[in-house]
Amino acid sequence: MKTAPVESITVREITDCCGVSRQTFYRNFLDKYDLINWYFDKLLAKSFDQMGKGRTITESLILKFDYIREERHFFTAAFRNDDQNNLREHDFDMIFAFYRNLIKEKTGAFPTREMDEILEMYCWAQIYRTVKWVLGGMKMSSKELAQMMVNAMPQPIEKLFRELNILE
């Protein structure tokens, strides 16, 4: 992904580079996008681990964006792709689940249907902005991007996060 766009990389090139057979590849992955999502999950687990180390949403986002910056080659290549199984949709699923689980952990219940709808829109907006930041060369600092995302938080989510003492 450092030398070629995702769409031009073939499974044959991946298997040759890794020294595995196509059969082994397909035993573990549906396609190259499934492989990208698997790798993203590994990076995201580290990223969310970083997020979990922050005491507030802002601190957590800063840690996450710092981590994305460290892995910029992967994220730049992966976010350029809009094909099937793309990383943007997978990222949404992970971020949405993260926030829903955080709310459940803090309140004892998943968000209401209305809050879920608002949270869904907010998560898509976060992904859009993150992708734009990554593909634009990450000119804004992690702190600036995190603050922008906090400032763009819908009022019901902001209110809930303040009540849960996870937003300063």
Image (spheres, rainbow, N blue to C red):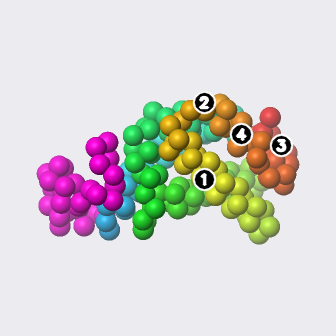
Identify the image quadrant of residue 56: top right
User: Of the residues under marks 2 and 3, which one precedes in the sequence?
Assistant: 2
Number of residues whose C-alpha sits closer than 10 Å to that of mark 3, classed few (under 14), some (14–19) or many (20 or more): some
Q: Secondary structure at mark 2?
A: loop
Tell me residue 147's x, y (percent): 72, 36
Dot 4 corresponds to which residue?
148
Q: CA distance from mark 4 to mark 1?
A: 13 Å
Dot 2 corresponds to which residue?
141
Tell me residue 107's x, y (percent): 77, 53
Q: Quadrant of the C terminus?
A: top right
Tell me residue 161's x, y (percent): 79, 46
User: Of the residues under marks 3 and 4, which one precedes in the sequence?
Assistant: 4
User: Of the residues under marks 4 and 2, which one precedes in the sequence?
Assistant: 2
Q: Residue at x 18, y 60 (%)?
A: 12
The dominant secondary structure in magenta is helix
User: Of the residues under marks 4 and 1, which one precedes in the sequence?
Assistant: 1
Q: Are marks 3 and 4 in contact (CB under 8 Å)?
A: no
Dot 3 corresponds to which residue?
162
Number of residues whose C-alpha sits closer than 10 Å to that of mark 4, classed few (under 14), some (14–19) or many (20 or more): some
Q: Residue at x 40, y 48 (%)?
A: 77
- Residue type at mark 4: give it: Met
Tell me residue 27's x, y (percent): 25, 67
Identify the image quadrant of residue 29: bottom left
User: Of the residues under marks 1 and 3, which one precedes in the sequence?
Assistant: 1
- Residue type at mark 3: give it: Arg
Q: CA distance from mark 4 to mark 2?
A: 11 Å
Q: Which residues are magenta?
A: 1-29
Q: Are marks 1 and 3 in contact (CB under 8 Å)?
A: no
- Residue type at mark 2: give it: Ser
